[in-house]
Image (spheres, coloured by chain):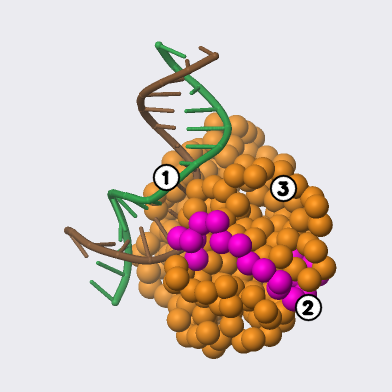
Chain colours: A orange, B green, C brown
Amino acid sequence: MPELPEVETVRATLAPRWVGRGIESVRVARADVVRPRDAGARALGLGSRVADILRHGKQLAVVFESGLVAQVHLGMSGQLFVLAPGAAPPRADHLHLRWRLDDGCTVCFRDPRRFGGVWLFDSLDALRTQRWDALGPDALTIRAHDLRANLRASARAIKACLLDQGVLAGVGNIYADEALFAAGINPHTPARALTRDETTRLAACVRSVLRDAVSAGGSSLRDYLDAELRPGTQQTRFRVYGRAGEPCTRCARTLQGGRVAQRTTTHCPSCQPLASS
DNA sequence: CACCACCCCTGGACGC
DNA sequence: TGCGTCCAGGGGTGGT
C-alpha cells in the first residue's frame, strides 16, 4: 500500500545509491511489468547514468542522462531496493527487474501482486504531458486554494475526492482516513458541502499527516520497505485506519467502519459528525 | 461529463 | 495440516 509517504521514503533512500551511477546491465525477468513490453534495455537506462529520481504523488520517475525516463509505479506491493555486491534479497521471488550498477550494487524492482510496473518515456516532457499533467497537485504541498479549486462543486463524498489522483496526487486509503480524522470531517460529506474553513483545515491536515508519515519513514503493513530494506514506523500511530470497533484516541467512542468509494473506511462518529455545522 | 462498479493480482488471515 | 474463501487496494476501463 505505498502512498505518498512510502514512495517519498523510497525516493529519498534510493537517490543517494542510484543517482550518478552508470547502468552496466539490465535484467528483465518478467517482461509484462515493463510498458511498452518490447522496449529495449536502453530504454531502461542501459549504457547511461541516472541523472535524477523525481516523485509526483505516488509515482517515481528515474531520469537517465540519455534523456530517457522510466516511470515506476509501486502499485499495491511494489518494492524498489538496493543490494550491495553479493548481498541476497530478503526474498528471491517476484523479482521482475534488476539494474546492475557500476559500483557492483543492484537495484531491484519486486512486486508480488503486479499492480505496479515501469512505464518508459522518451523524455521528461513526454512523461509530463502524457501522465503527470493529468494528476492534481502533489499532496505533500497542497494549498487550500488549489484543493478548493479541484473539489469545485463536486457532489462526491470528500473521501472519494481525496483518493482521486486527478484532484490531489499521493493520498491513498490510509492517509485519506487519517487526514479526515485530523480535520474532523466525515468521509461521506459531499465535497461541495464543505465550508471554506473546512477545506482550508483539510488541506493543512493532509499536509501534516503526510509530513509526519514521511518523517517516520512511511507505514509498513505488509510488504513495504524502503530502498535500504528498512520498514517504516508510522503504522503504530494510526488514529483511525484499521481501528474500526476500537475506541477513538480523542473521545473514546467506538470507531465506526464502513465503505466509501469501494474502500474500507473508518471514522469517529463524534469527532467527525456528518452534519457539518 | 460525472461518477461508479468492476477488474487486475497475490499473500495472508480465517474457518472448517 | 491443509484446503477453500475472503479480503486488502491503486488505478485503468467500460458502463450508467
How far apart are the two marked residues, 1 and 3, measured between alpha carbons? 37 Å
Can residue A136 be seen by looking at this rendering? no
Mark 2 is surrounded, within 10 Å at the Cα level, by few (under 14), some (14 to 19) or many (20 or more) other residues, namely some
Residue to which mark 2 is pinned: A20
Residue to which mark 1 is pinned: A259
Image coordinates of residue A34 in percent, x first then y, are: 50, 66
- Residue pictured at 55% horizontal, 31% vertical: A245
Dot 3 falls on a residue whose secondary structure is: loop
Q: Give the amino acid at mark 2.
A: Gly
Q: Earlier in the sequence, mark 2 or mark 1?
A: 2
Q: Give the amino acid at mark 1.
A: Arg
**A127 to A106, vertically: above or below:** below
Image coordinates of residue A45 in percent, x first then y, are: 63, 76
How far apart are the two marked residues, 2 and 1, measured between alpha carbons? 45 Å
Q: Find the magenta span and give its range.
A: A13-34
Residue to which mark 3 is pinned: A89
Q: Are marks 2 and 1 on the same chain?
A: yes
- Residue pictured at 37% horizontal, 62% vertical: A156
Q: From the viewer's perspective, tell me whether residue A145 is left or right of residue A159.
A: right
Dot 2 falls on a residue whose secondary structure is: loop
**A114 to A48, vertically: above or below:** above
Image coordinates of residue A103 in percent, x first then y, are: 82, 68
- Residue pictured at 75% horizontal, 51% vertical: A229
Q: Nearer the viewer, mark 1 or mark 3?
A: 3
The quadrant in which residue A223 appears is top right
Give the chain letter at badge 1: A
Give the chain letter at badge 2: A
Along the viewing direction, whichever of A62 and A142 lies nearer the viewer:
A62
How far apart are the two marked residues, 2 and 3, measured between alpha carbons? 23 Å
Q: Give the amino acid at mark 3.
A: Pro
